Amino acid sequence: MVLPFALLLGMVALAPLWAPEWWGRRYPQVAFGFAVLTVGYYLIGLRSGSRVLHTASEYVSFISLVGSLYVVSGGIHLKVRGGATPWENTVFLTLGALLANVLGTTGASMLLIRPWIRMNRARITTHHVVFFIFIVSNVGGALTPIGDPPLFLGYLKGVPFWWVAAHCWPMWGVALGLLLGVFLWMDGRNFQRIPRHLRDEARRADSWAWQGGGNVFFLLVILGAVFLDHPPMLREILMLAAAAGSYWTTPRPVHEANHFNLHPVREVAILFLGIFATMMPALDWLEVNASRFGTPTPGLLYWGSGLLSSVLDNAPTYLSFLSATVGALATPEALQAGKSVLPSLAETHPGVAALLSNPVLSRTLMAISMGSVFFGANTYIGNGPNFMVKAIADQQGCRTPSFPGYILRFTLPILLPIFAVVGWLFFR
């Protein structure tokens, strides 16, 4: 019963590249078909309706957050004129990384990619698009559950909201600092090669303006709703209400300026419905059998979750490795320690409480969190916003690398050495 999960993830990764037209028409039928097969097995074969209901509630919470942030960010339009110096670009990417923890990597990417292209219009090249994907669409959102889907799934599994920020900020700071340093060097070289009159124009003050300010209220509603656990479904109702309010109150010219439509979030909702349903057997099997494979180390979990996130979606990768780690490390002694140190959390999520109550075991959760989020930048298919950013850049006439070119020119010589430094410093 793990086979539908493996087949679906393989098709999500490869079908858009090998059969894009067929996949664009048939992915709903594929996702629903695999989902029905697995859910039917649980309901009829195992008679485990409670397991299906629990997974359904997690899916609703997940898609409510991702969808509402996408809709609200689509109602805010930033207008910028003029060029940008390398230092201004670096500051912009830094602010984009911080904003990704508030709007999510998808929301921040959709909000900022068009202003980013406009402010570099005179000299836009491949490294501008790629480093935007690296920083805003992936690494930047590694501090909060809002930032990236894997971390929100961890939050739903019991990881406290601020735990990742409190424990993983050094890894985030090192990775982000190194990426910004490499970008500044590359962008400085690019800046020196353009004609002198364009450099002089870029040094003039930019003109900034924004539309859709009323959506800030809806954004605050979503952020506040994240912390609501009771009564059940109140959080999701508030998020969806905020999304609906944003969609119907945003002036049409703002949506048109952002080229906003609901197709991307519809695709995410359908595919993740299939992923959440089909991954139940995989997660259950891992939790029961992971101890047979020995004790996982933080380094193994960091590289393992990272490399898998490079070619599959990082959200199911995170859950798979979390289940495996709980199964391997949540021994009776660790579970008892979790009950004594974190009694309230242990009542609902005993495995996660066992990991968090032990400083040594908690490093495994840090490794899974950073590996899943960081390595999503390695390929176009590692994280949802990556392909969205590439599509928008292509529409705007920007030069973007091919799938192999992205890996050979940027991932291997830039990302992997930086991730190796992070792994050596924190997870060896």
Image: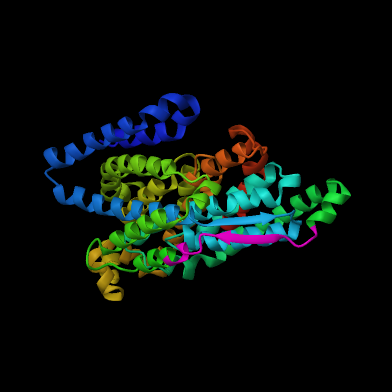
Q: In which quarter of the image is the N terminus?
A: top left
Q: In which quarter of the image is the C terminus?
A: bottom right
* Residue 285 figure quarter: top left
Picture layout, residue 350 above or below residue 309: below
In the displayed image of the protein, which residue is found farthest to the right?
196
Q: Name the one closer to the observer, 379 or 251.
A: 251
**Residue 162 x %, y %:** 43, 69
Q: Is 126 displayed left or right of 258 in the figure?
A: right
**Residue 311 x %, y %:** 48, 39
Q: Is 212 displayed left or right of 342 in the figure?
A: right
Picture layout, residue 389 above or below residue 224: above
Q: Name the one closer to the observer, 43 or 303.
A: 43
User: Is residue 15 within the magenta segment?
Assistant: no
**Residue 61 x %, y %:** 31, 56
Q: Is 374 displayed left or right of 220 in the figure?
A: right
**Magenta region: which residues?**
203-217
Q: Is residue 259 visible?
A: yes
Q: Name the one closer to the observer, 39 or 83.
A: 83
User: Is residue 216 within the magenta segment?
Assistant: yes
Question: Total of numbered circles in the picture?
Answer: 0
User: Which residue is found at the position 61% from the left and 41% from the top?
Assistant: 393
Q: Is residue 428 visible?
A: no
**Residue 213 x %, y %:** 51, 64
Q: Which colour scheme is used?
A: rainbow
* Residue 172 figure quarter: bottom right
Q: Name the one closer to the observer, 406 or 104.
A: 104
User: Which residue is found at the position 35% from the left and 32% from the top?
Assistant: 7
User: Which residue is found at the position 58% from the left and 48% from the top?
Assistant: 133
